[in-house]
Image (cartoon, rainbow, N blue to C red):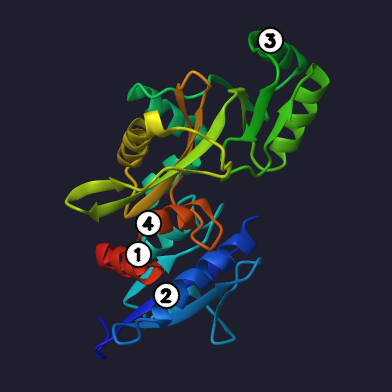
Amino acid sequence: MSLSSKIRVAVLRGGPSNLYDTSLKTGEFVLSALREMTDTYEPLDIFISKGGEWHKSGLVYKPHRALEHADVVWNTLHGSYGEDGQVQKLLEGMKIPFTGPRTMASTLAMNKDMSKRLYKERSMLTPAYELVTMDGVNDDKLIAIFRSFLQPVVVKPANQSGSIGMSISYTFDGLKESVEKAFAYSPRVLVEEFIKGDEISCGVIEGVKGENIYALTPYSSEPESEFGEVKNMIADRAKEAHEVLGLSHYSSSDFIITPKKKIYILETNSLPPLHEGSLMHRSLGADGWRHNDFVDHVLRLAL
């Protein structure tokens, strides 16, 4: 802890992933909240360029120098580098508290193959899939996969956040093209069963209202989505996903709700976007959270 009475919070934002712009927005969300709590916190804006350079006050520093005066780090980096365990390993090595999951949990959440296996161990429905590797793919393999699924199928990189590199294919040629596209982002690709339904996100926060893991109101980007009768089940799945992946402080899981109200979990975002307009931001608002209260709560968890 710094000698001053204020807690110095280094906010990491930007980064080399394809979610650079989203990270800048989430970082500004956190910085804005900290600026409203200057009696308690002193924000330190740590900008990481697309090339991976760490900047503080306009100057380039090595990570340990950029963070040498910080008491705690809020990691708002999204996607690769910020969510796959790389930054977490660095921060753990520096023995500095930080928000979000530790290295192993970050790696698990980013790895769609491993996370889906863990979901299935908890008897959660998740779309069926086949894993394709760059060094093991050929036409015979793809033909077998094509024949084993009803079309269309969803093709996505196994180690990317959100919809990066994802596409939907309807034909065999489309499958080949989609797999090649996904290989540009990861040497491991999932070919996944397409589930028709409404996509719902549900965020969770630790240590709220007497619950170890508290679920926020599930939220959909489609206003007409109706999921009231399975709302509690969605919340339970989101809490279970957070727990089974070993995540920390907060997270958000994405689901598909079929017309028959079956709940399929798609993935869990260990560091969901928080900026205005994001689903997590909307869920926080629907539950009555002010953004500075949320930021203060998470920092106290991290410390």
Along the polypeptide, which appears first: circle 3 or circle 2? 2
Please name which of the two marks, 3 or 2, marks the residue nearer to the observer.
Answer: 2
In the picture of the structure, the residue carrying the numbered disc 4 is 100
Give the SS element for disc 1.
helix
Amino acid type indicated by mark 4: Gly
Please name which of the two marks, 4 or 3, marks the residue nearer to the observer.
Answer: 4
Please name which of the two marks, 4 or 2, marks the residue nearer to the observer.
Answer: 2
Percent x, y for residue 77?
A: 52, 61
In the picture of the structure, the residue carrying the numbered disc 1 is 294
Q: Nearer the viewer, residue 164 or 239?
A: 239
Along the polypeptide, which appears first: circle 1 or circle 3? 3
Q: Is residue 16 visible?
A: no
What residue is shown at x 32% (from left), y 55% (from top)? 249
Q: Quadrant of residue 23?
A: bottom right
In the picture of the structure, the residue carrying the numbered disc 2 is 33
Give the SS element for disc 4.
loop
Residue at the left extreme?
Answer: 210
In the picture of the structure, the residue carrying the numbered disc 3 is 144
Q: Nearer the viewer, residue 154 or 61?
A: 154
Q: CA distance from mark 1 to mark 4?
A: 13 Å
Relative vertical location of residue 103 with respect to residue 126 in this rendering, above or below: below
Crowding near the residue tagged with mark 4, few <14, some 14–19, many ≥20 C-alpha atoms within 10 Å: many
Please name which of the two marks, 1 or 4, marks the residue nearer to the observer.
Answer: 1
What residue is shown at x 46% (from left), y 60% (from top)? 87
